[in-house]
Amino acid sequence: MNSVAGAVPPNDLDAEGAVLAAAMLKQEAVDAIICTGLESSHFYNRDHARIWSAVVELAQAGQPVDLVQVASRLRARGEIKAVGGPEYLAKLVDETPAVRNVEAYATTVIQKARLRRAIDEAHRLAAEGYGAQDAEAFLESAAATFAGLAEAGSKTESLVSVAEAIHATITEIGELAEGTREVACIRTGLDALDRVCPLREAQLTVLAAGPGIGKTSLALQISASAAKAGDGVLFVSLEMPRNQLTRRLMAQCGGVDGSKLADPRRLTYEDWQRMTAAGSGLGGSPLWIDDRPDASPLTISSAVRRAKARATKAGLKLALVVVDYLQLVSGRTAGRDANREQQVSHVARELKVLANRESVHVMALAQLNHDAEKGERRPRMSDLRESKAVGMHADNVWLLNNPSALERSSRGLGGREEAAGEQVELIVDKQRAGSAGHLLLWFYPSHTRFALGDRGVR
């Protein structure tokens, strides 16, 4: 254990003694302590670690755990003298008062061990940093190390009786039926979409389309709507830098022809007024942008935690995380031998884990294969580029089908000439909590904005 100027590493010997005493005094305390995740390696005192190891061995063998049995087990392992003999075990029991909430003491031991581990890793990384050649690789390794340490301490109770689960479920259903609790869904700004496929926390939605179809526009519109409704939103943009993204967002929200931003001299006085009003409204909304072009699941997780902290400080909840787009996220953590499909699948799985762990809704934009744009057939989930396994990890898969955009692209026309709306089909190809279906929308290229179609849901 490394230390600074002879400082004693973090520990709590009283808590360690309390845990061991409780285990030898009450059989039921052993299971409660084990459920906290306490291991021998968590003890600072090496003798305490040996004693706890003997306790666990007895429990695993189905034998009673008490002072006599623990001493016998240590004797069989040749460690009874090393720990101070039966006298030390008796001293632990005699000097420790009746322990209530032994889980709290066990948690203290674990937390001190985590601090020692963090200090050790910091020393190791400091030493490795002097010889590191690749700064990005070193920093990503460091981030992975501390992210792993952070996640290791975020375990929650996973074992509940079916009676507890049923009671909680009936209570929830009753509150929803009585109107005393609202279903927590993200407001997309498109009411029919909210009804057909509501976006809830701890879900992963994949929004896929070919280039120029409007997936980024739809994601921006949903982000702005959610933020306007008071939900915190993080937009992770790997494809577009923040200045381009905010220009597009202001034009969209202000109802300004986005093509004019390529040559701002074309902006009219009314355009400036609309842009300024949109910027003022957006500036006060809980919407954050991360435009790191080489983002990985680790850096995205870090950005989410930072955005959550800012949202919490503002008295809000981070509800939506948009990643634009999936195939650009670095999949190096999948392993050196992983091919591209395995990497993209790994990224999708990590985003689903992130959604669960942070209780946010993650919307990952994705590209479709070029074959999906050929002919007149509608795109399918199997058309997802570079990984058909992405759909397996997602809770929802949305596909945008816009034949007019393909025709416009082939004619080389921009948004200004195509001010009229184009009918777009949003296909819900997968919905884990509901049924598949599709929704008719209108897309206005000049304003990069979507609206509900005249016939709505089908």
Image (cartoon, helix red, strand yellow):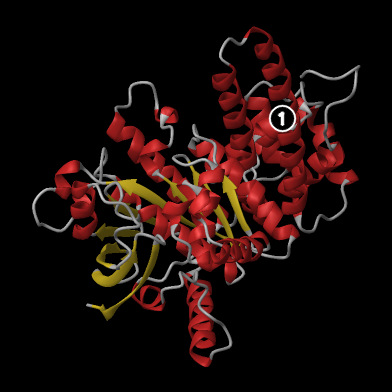
Residue 193 appears in which quarter of the rendering? bottom left
Dot 1 corresponds to which residue? 118
> Is 328 on the left or on the right of 437, as rendered?
right
Outermost residue toward the bottom in this view: 178
Residue 388, relative to residue 287: is it above or below?
above
- Pointer 1: residues within 10 angstroms few (<14), some, or many (20+)? some
Q: From the top left corner, tell me how far across and down residue 89 is, in percent.
A: 80, 36
Residue shown at the point (19%, 42%) measured from the top left? 370
Quadrant where the C terminus sits is bottom left
Q: From the top left corner, tell me how far across and down residue 265 is, in percent.
A: 52, 50
> Is 192 on the left or on the right of 400, as rendered?
right
Residue 451 appears in which quarter of the rendering? bottom left
Between 301 and 232, the residue placed more toward the observer is: 232
Quadrant where the N terminus sits is top right
Circle 1: residue type: Ala
> Is 176 on the left or on the right of 99, as rendered?
left
Q: Please tell me whether mark 1 sits on a helix, a strand or a loop.
A: helix
Residue shown at the point (88%, 52%) measured from the top left? 97
